[in-house]
Image (cartoon, rainbow, N blue to C red):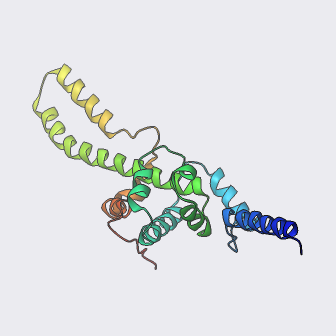
Amino acid sequence: MTKRKKYVIRWLVFILLAYFVTRPMYYPGVGNNPDVRKEEMLRLQQGNVLSPEETDRFLISWSELLEKGFDNQKLIELLNSTKNPRHAISSRIRRWIEFQGWNLNRFFFIGRRLKKITAECHKLQKANSKRASLEQQLNNTKDESIIGTIKRIIADDSRLSDNVTQAEVDLIMPKLEVIESILKGELVYKPEHG
């Protein structure tokens, strides 16, 4: 074989090797599987609503992801930002999330949504503790302007933000501290079955 042919073959091998190294690996059950894609599309079409099953599934996957020892601080910060997760994380993390059967955007949407709901739950807890003292003041005053102001404050404090539903608050409130600890990476989620 001439030097020129060897040179051409080496370059072809190098180009093919570079091509395959830079492509995501194939994971069975993810990507081109039509059943998984239909399920993902249905989940994405559900929009902003979090179901208990999807929340549990996220918390399990999030705990496992943080246990893997990837850049945990960066992942946790990503839940607080509006950055596109596809550009903010490594391809290795992205492949791991997709291997778990998640759409990357939906995965981080749920994490960000849980952060928003936990903040709303804290706001409601503070409003409930403030409500008792306001109701006591309401009972002790005779001034109509003060009564109107106190009633308005109570109504404003107990109102949910436009982005959070009562069903989501009811879902998160009983496990608020646990979910916050999981999102911060301080606790591993072990769901209760049965």
Q: Could you tell me if residue 167 is visible in this image?
A: no
Name the spot of residue 135 as percent of width and height, x first. Answer: 18, 38
Query: Which residue corresponds to the image point at 61% horizontal and 69% vertical from the top-left?
Result: 99
Which one is in front, 161 or 82? Answer: 82
Query: Which residue corresponds to the image point at 40% horizontal and 52% vertical from the top-left?
Result: 77
174 is higher (above) or lower (below) than 84: below
Splitting the image into 4 quarters, where does residue 103 fall?
A: bottom right
Query: Which residue corresponds to the image point at 26% horizontal and 42% vertical from the top-left?
Result: 127
Q: Residue furthest left?
A: 140
Q: Residue furthest front?
A: 3
Q: Residue furthest right?
A: 1
Name the spot of residue 64 as percent of width and height, x first. Answer: 46, 71
| Drawn side of residue 133 relative to residue 15, left or right | left
| Drawn side of residue 158 relative to residue 98, left or right | left
79 is higher (above) or lower (below) than 94: above
| Total numbered badges shown on the rendered structure | 0
Name the spot of residue 88 as percent of width and height, x first. Answer: 51, 51
Which one is in front, 17 or 179? Answer: 17
Which one is in front, 62 or 51? Answer: 62
Splitting the image into 4 quarters, where does residue 190 fall?
A: bottom left
Q: Could you tell me if residue 132 is visible in this image?
A: yes
Splitting the image into 4 quarters, where does residue 187 fall?
A: bottom left
| Drawn side of residue 101 relative to residue 126, left or right | right
Name the spot of residue 6 as percent of width and height, x first. Answer: 83, 70
Which part of the image, by quadrant, shows the N terminus? bottom right
| Drawn side of residue 192 relative to residue 152, left or right | right
Which one is in front, 102 or 57? Answer: 102
